[in-house]
Amino acid sequence: MTLIPWLKEVFTIRRLTPRQAVRVLVLVLGLSLWSYSWLSASAGILQLYEFSLVRMGTQVRIVLYAHDHATASQAASDAYERIEHLEQIFSDYREDSELMRICRSASQSPRVVSPELFFILDKSLYFSRLSDGAFDVTVGPVVKLWREARRLRQLPEAEQLAKAKLLVGYQNLVLDPAQGTVFLKRDGMDLDLGAIAKGYAADQALAILRNYGIRRALVDAGGDLSLGDPPPGRPGWRIEIQSPELKSGLGPCELFLHNTAVATSGDAYQFLETRGQRFSHIIKPSEALGVRDSVIATVIAPDGTTADAMATTLSVLTPSQGLELANSLEGVSAFLVRRQGNDLHTFASSRFPPFTGGPLQHAGRKPLSYAH
Ligand code: AMP
Ligand code: MG
């Protein structure tokens, strides 16, 4: 039967045989699917896509809105590839990373490095100077001792710490922008990008997505978030921030953010507890000790590199020093939760946005989580 007489038959009011009914159903479904995909592509209906892979030793999540699956997955795959490339440069776990090769050779003579490594070392020096060494990219030798201490669950030897401390000092890292070179003034120095590289990687991944025309996106590199335009029809990405209120389920502790970055640092999951003391994996370089004032620092900044570096810095500084520093930087704001004994104290810098929303049911497992 040809289509026109068949349709006539269908639309005349008479009982359909089961076969005809199935045909109608298939036709209607086919038409709806076709028109839906045509409409989404042409009328700009965006769909949500989520991706998650372990990169840089942490779970990296990409959440984005795109018109179709092919574009979404191609863009995400390129973003992950960019992160892998950066990991190969920045990792201090891989002996063959560019960073590790530089640590081994740049004390003999200045070495030319990749633009990415130069950029992040330059940023690191900026934050080291800005924080008067609370953030110190040369803290590697001390970090390694504390990493081992956490594994063995015992404090590093005082003598080893004293030796390692002699190798820490951002003043001994020399960058030459004209030549693109790095020089380490002392043999045995060890650079550590753990406090800044993930934020930079999140920025870079977001930039890759933008190249695909994907602007409504979020990249979460293990708590370092870079945010693009908000989800459709929303004021921003809903970010839950660790605070005592969140823990007790009383809120308010959510923010709606977009086109910005947010990072959290603290000793919530990585610490050494021994002889009644708790030492963070974040080091106070002036003492070569893990930070003992338990602080969770959340920083909002124009880019992920700044948010990441500042969140670590504010975990080392006292709250008043940290807030003063945050207040002095354009576009930067901070929220601190400090534990003293059984008491939790919160501090917010002057530009930190007010929390929105009421009680939250789902306190995130991580210090910082989000929904969309
Ligand atoms: P984050 O999770 O961003 O706060 O970074 C923590 C990591 O940064 C640690 O695991 C170390 O690798 C490194 N780090 C620790 N203390 C410092 C410090 N004072 N300055 C710079 N990097 C640090
Ligand atoms: Mg950091």
Image (tube, rainbow, N blue to C red):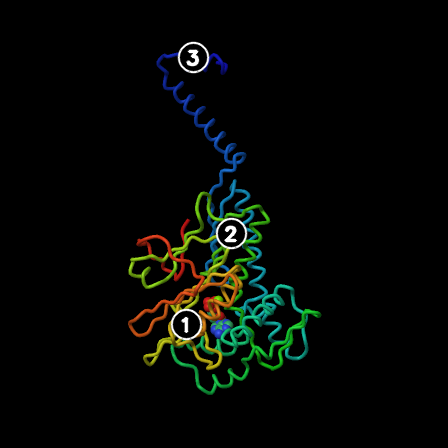
The total of numbered circles placed on residues is: 3
The kind of secondary structure element at disc 1 is: helix
Extreme-front residue of the structure: 350
C-alpha span from label 2 to label 3: 53 Å
Q: Residues within 10 Å of mark 3 (few under 14, many from 20)?
A: some
N-terminal label among 2 and 1: 2
Looking at this view, name the residue that lies furthest to the bottom: 159
Question: Where is residue 52 shown, x and y percent of the image?
Answer: 47, 53
Would residue 49 appear left or right of 187 to someone viewing this image? left
Q: Is residue 191 above or below residue 249?
A: below
Q: Earlier in the sequence, mark 2 or mark 3?
A: 3
Q: Is residue 90 above or below residue 25?
A: below
- Badge 3 amino acid: Glu
Residue at 32 percent of width and 69 percent of height: 344
Between the C-alphas of marks 2 and 1, the distance is 29 Å
Return the residue at label 3.
Answer: 9
Label 3 – label 1 distance at C-alpha: 78 Å
